[in-house]
Amino acid sequence: MKEVSVSSIRRQYAGSNIEDDLLLIDDFGKIPNPEQPRKIDGIVLGMCQSGQVSFQIDTEQHIIKANEAVIISDGQVLTGHQATPDFKGILIIMSNDFFQEVLKDVHDLSSLFLFSRQRPVFPLEAEELISLKNYFRAIKMKVDDYEQPFRKDVVRSLMTAMTYDVCNVISRMQHDDHALQRNEIFFIRYIELVKQNFRSERHVSWYAKQLGITAKYLSEVIKKASRRTPNEWIDYYTVLEIRGMLKNTTLSIREISNILNFSNQSFMGKFFKDHVGMSPSQYRRK
């Protein structure tokens, strides 16, 4: 299955970008519609300004109308894209690496993951709509300012601020919604445990024990809540951590392997290559 990523969209649309980390599209309707299912590689935040667009996210049909936003998370599958002739929208696509950098100081990510996977489409109130549009313009202006020596850092800071406001929208929506279902509560608790312990604990049975349930039941509720298995979430955070260490530190690959409690450097190398498609040393050189 082909993927939707910053690099793949850049080949079709010359929007404002920071290499293969970030892409801003000010007229989403101009992008050619994919004929086949596409897997998202990164994070997509979109907002409909007029008309409407419909597509399936992980086989579930969604319609995004004017003044509504959508978050599509890494690994989700997009199919059946159809838009009305008057559709216009803006889109922000981030690579997983850049997403990690933006969100490294943002707390309570579990609610963001949960909301974007269970309820990817959400209406915006008037002030929220204006705020997101202003963020988009400000970020685009800074992305296009190639004379700014701290261009990427400024953009990252603006993206972090925007994310806090998006999280505020999520908080409002969750408050307006009915009480979380039992499986969603377990998912939030599970993600918090994973974020705190994935460096040393990567067995689902350990997390099930902490939650006071069986590993089988944990697998059932996590997959129902997020459409990912518990192991996939552990792997997700582990890969993000390795990527961050390779990119932002001078630690050796052996040191990273020790910090993350892999049995040896070779095992971590195989794990990383299976998930990223290249060895840790290749990723660091890239």
Image (cartoon, rainbow, N blue to C red):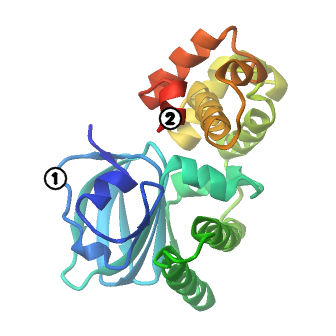
State the separation of the CA atoms marked 1 and 2. 35 Å
- The residue at 75%/18% (across/down) is 258
Q: Residue 266 versus residue 223: which sits nearer the camera?
A: 266
- Coordinates of residue 203 in the picture (x, y in percent): 70, 17
- Coordinates of residue 218 in the picture (x, y in percent): 66, 27
- The residue at 27%/81% (across/down) is 87
User: Which of the two labelled residues, at mark 1 and mark 2, occupies the earlier sequence position?
Assistant: 1
- The residue at 52%/77% (across/down) is 147
Q: Is residue 233 visible?
A: yes
Circle number at residue 35: 1
Mark 2 surroundings: few (<14), some (14-19) or many (≥20) residues within 10 A: few
Which quarter shows the N terminus? top left
Helix, strand or loop under label 1: loop
Query: Where is 230 relative to 244, above or below?
Result: above
- The residue that label 2 is drawn on is 285
Quadrant in which residue 134 is drawn: bottom right
